[in-house]
Image (tube, helix red, strand yellow):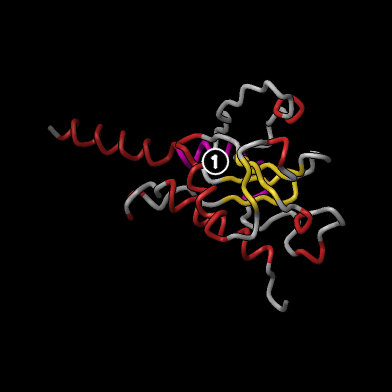
Amino acid sequence: MRLLQRTRMFALSMLCAIPVAALAQVTSPTQEPSSTPAASSVSQAPPGGLDAAKAIYVIPMKDRLEHFLTNELVKWGRFEVTLNPRQADALLSDTTEVDIKQLMTPDAKIRKTSARTRGTAFLIDLKTERVLWSAAKKPSESFFLGGDKSTRELAEEIIDQLRKDMHPKGQ
């Protein structure tokens, strides 16, 4: 009986360690993930940067995250959200591994991204293929505090971060 309890505790501790190990593989050991974007304020962004994006295409993502991100963007009203990538200025994705040239073809078959992380977002300029903004949000709370956040909560946090970064303090 005691061996069974120890085995269960070991299995539980391994399950809790898996998300941490997966996150460690994605980020380099010397650089911690940050929720601050590369261009943290609109005034520091180069011409044609984050403030120049008017229309955003949200690419299909894992766990239907694109639905919740689109909802948050529409509620905010700062950007136009388009269903046609050829009408967009920027692309919102959970990975930077997007074939933009293929996406822009008229007969493109748009598939879900194959991101291995949960809680990342990248706003990519479709003309220059530069990352205009990025965020990395913690995808879950501690196992002992209730486990995974819902996809809706994650989308709210990501768009809230974009709002903050679009309107830095002092403006």
Please give the name of the residue rendered at 55% of the width and 29% of the height, measured from the top-left corner.
Answer: 112
In this rendering, would 145 be left or right of 55?
left
Residue 170 position in % (x across, y down) = 71, 78
**53 relative to 95 in the view: left or right:** right
Quadrant in the picture for the C terminus: bottom right
Q: Is residue 40 above or below residue 103?
A: below
At x 48%, y 47%, the residue is 68
* Residue at the extreme left of the image, as rendered: 1
Residue 57 found in image quarter: top right
Classify mark 1: helix, strand or loop.
helix
Residue type, numbered disc 1: Leu
Image spot of residue 41 (x, y percent) = 74, 64
Q: Which residue is mark 1?
A: 23
The span shown in magenta is 19-33
Residue 130 within the segment the image draws in magenta: no
Residue closest to the eye, 50 or 88: 88
Farthest residue toward the right?
47
Q: Residue at x 53, y 46 (%)?
A: 119
Q: Quadrant of the N terminus?
A: top left
- Counting from the top left corner in percent of width and height, residue 164 is at 63, 65
